[in-house]
Image (cartoon, rainbow, N blue to C red):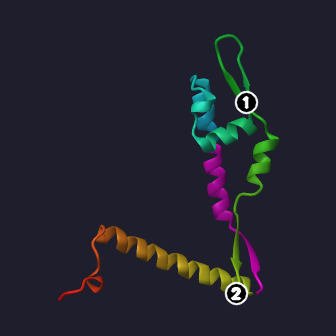
Amino acid sequence: MRVYLQLYFNSVKKAEEDVYFDNDMIESRRNIEAGVNIDDLPKNALKKVVKHPRIKRPGDDIQVTFNEDAPKEAKRRHGFFALVSNHEKNPFDCLCEYRKRETIESFFQSMKSRADGIRSWRGIRIR
């Protein structure tokens, strides 16, 4: 059996991920400067805090500065995603099929939330 790996780049997704990353770093810096213990930060923030900022404690203040190279390296991967298929060889067709599937799944999710756990009429047997 053959497996096809399709790699894609989405510039809008890159911009969104860059903004999210920057906001997360700023929020982490504020929390650390406010005196929050590093271990009490959320897991995703903790991973970034360990890699990227430099923390200085001159006197009673806490100063947080960012290492410039590490965030650039992390942002370099933003916007990319991969699809793996054993059916579609053409990258365009593979992406179209994926987007159709995503639309169908969103409809199912919407129907589930409206049903609120109630079984559909087809699943009920009347004797």
What residue sits 64% from the left and 63% below the top? 12
Q: Is residue 30 at least partly visible in the picture?
A: no
Q: Is residue 14 at least partly visible in the picture?
A: yes
Label 2 crowd bin: few (<14), some (14–19), many (20+), radius 10 Å: some
Residue at which label 2 appears: 88
The nearer-to-camera label among 2 and 1 is: 2
Q: Is residue 21 magenta?
A: yes
* Three-letter amino acid code at the position of disc 2: Glu
**Residue 119, disc:** none
Compared with 127, 64 (above or below) is above
* Three-letter amino acid code at the position of disc 1: Thr
Residues in magenta, as a range: 1-24
State the image quarter where residue 97 is shown: bottom right
Q: Is residue 8 magenta?
A: yes
Residue 63 location (% of width, % of height): 69, 23
Residue 70 location (% of width, % of height): 79, 43
Residue 31 located left or right of residue 114: right
| Element type where label 1 sits in the image | strand
| Element type where label 2 sits in the image | loop
What residue sits 42% from the left and 76% below the top? 107
State the image quarter where residue 69 is shown: top right
Residue at which label 1 appears: 65
Extreme residue toward the front, this view: 127
Compared with 54, 61 (above or below) is above
Residue 123 located left or right of residue 15: left
Extreme residue toward the top, this view: 59
Q: Earlier in the sequence, mark 2 or mark 1?
A: 1
Residue 46 location (% of width, % of height): 64, 38
What residue sits 68% from the left and 41% below the top? 47
- 83 and 66: which is toward the camera: 83
Residue 49 located left or right of residue 27: right
Is there a contact, CB below 8 Å, between mark 2 and mark 1? no
